[in-house]
Amino acid sequence: MAKFHFNGSSSNVLDDEEATELPDPGAVRQHARTVASELMYHCDGMLGRPWREWSMTVTDDQGNEVLSFHFAEATEQAKS
């Protein structure tokens, strides 16, 4: 299994220093959306910024971008 970092950003960047091992791209996508949805469920924003200003970028252990999306997209996909 490969390791992936789930990094959040708005005016600040929150680097995921601990990687998560996942088996395939589908699992990476699902985990990223779940993390974003859970964060948004518990509060209206983070570090003084509303969720509409946040995005998530997933990178592999070599720093290559695997996936990127705005947090709001996680709730839009959950509705469909």
Image (spheres, rainbow, N blue to C red):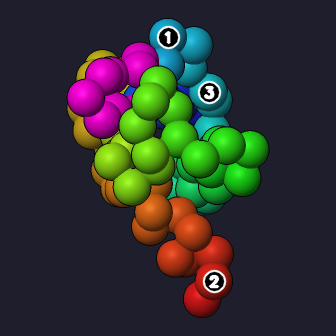
Secondary element at image label 1: loop
The answer to whether the residues at label 3 and label 1 have Cβ atoms under 8 Å apart is no
Question: Front-most of 15 and 9?
Answer: 9
Residue 45 is at least partly visible in this image: yes
Q: Which residue is disc 1 drawn over? A: 17
User: Label 1 neighbourhood size at 10 Å, few (<14), some (14-19), many (20+)?
Assistant: few
Residue underneath mark 3: 20
* Image coordinates for residue 23, horizontal then vertical, percent: 62, 44
The residue range painted magenta reads 8-15
Earlier sequence position, callout 2 versus callout 1: 1
Q: Position of residue 69 (x, y in %)?
A: 35, 56
Q: Among all residues in the image, which is located at the extreme top? A: 17
Dot 1 amino acid type: Glu
Q: Residue at x 56, y 20 (%)?
A: 19
Quadrant (top left/top right/bottom left/bottom right) for the N terminus: top right
Residue type, numbered disc 3? Thr
- Residue 15, position in %: x, y? 41, 18
Say if 61 sits above or below 59 in the image. Answer: above
Query: Are there few (<14), some (14-19), or many (20+) residues within 10 Å of tag 2?
Result: few
Q: Residue at x 54, y 76 (%)?
A: 77
**Disc 3 from disc 2: Cα separation:** 26 Å
Left or right: where 51 falls relative to 39: left
List the residue tagged with mark 2. 79
Residues packed near mark 3 inside 10 Å, few (<14), some (14 to 19) or many (20 plus): some
Q: Secondary structure at mark 3?
A: strand
The answer to whether the residue labelled 3 contacts the one labelled 2, judged by CB atoms less than 8 Å apart, is no
